[in-house]
Image: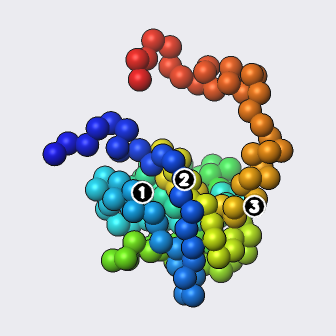
Amino acid sequence: MKRDKLGQYLIGSYTARFDRSGRVKIPEKFRAAIEEQYGRDVFITSLTDQAVQIYPLKVWERLAGITDTGLIHLRPEVRNFMRRVNLKGSQYEIDSKGRVLINQALKEKAQLEDEVEVIGMNNHLEVWCKARIQELIEQKPLRDEDFERIAELHPKGSSE
């Protein structure tokens, strides 16, 4: 049975809780999509310290430009990026119950407490402190100019 196109994306949001071991259960809809499309290996990091990102490992490899040649790593801004995301980031495997471990350093930086919001970002997940994401959305509402800039990102003539 073939999934429809939207079924391939990680969209929507769900509330989740940490267990005593610091693991968070990936909501079932997200877990099924990740495992079906990418497998169980993920890379967990924080790009800005506001939230924790969970990338399917295959998505992370494309994003980070991991290649056999390694030439991209000669650029100073790429080295800075790699240092930042790898300092506290780690590769994990989603366990049989759909959980992943988020290390204490990442939890503290992102101010994650027992209950968190897991938000689908099309090809990866973000884990947010519920109060922090609500505050961010209220402080930075979308304006008409934002929608115009977003529309400019979409390729002209594309029907998707």
x, y percent for residue 12: 51, 48
Say which label, 3 or 2, has the lower sequence index: 2
Q: Which quadrant holds the C terminus?
A: top left
Q: 12 or 22, which is in the foreground?
A: 12
Label 1 SS: helix
Q: Residues within 10 Å of mark 2 (few under 14, many from 20)?
A: some
Q: Which residue is mark 3?
A: 131
Give the vertical position of 96 relative to 122 (above or below).
below
Query: Marks 3/1: CA distance?
Result: 22 Å
x, y percent for residue 13: 54, 53
Q: Which residue is mark 1?
A: 30
Task: Tell me the residue at 52%/61% (across/down).
Answer: 54
**Nearer mark to the viewer, of 2 and 1:** 2
Q: Which residue is mark 2?
A: 13
Query: Marks 3/2: CA distance?
Result: 14 Å
- The three-letter amino acid code for the residue at tag 1 is Phe
Do the residues under discs 2 and 1 have CB atoms within 8 angstroms? no
- The three-letter amino acid code for the residue at tag 2 is Ser
> Can you name the residue that lies furthest to the top here?
157
To which quarter of the image does residue 52 belong? bottom right
- The three-letter amino acid code for the residue at tag 3 is Ala
Task: Tell me the residue at 46%/66% (across/down).
Answer: 26
Q: 32 or 150, which is in the foreground?
A: 32
Do the residues under discs 3 and 1 have CB atoms within 8 angstroms? no
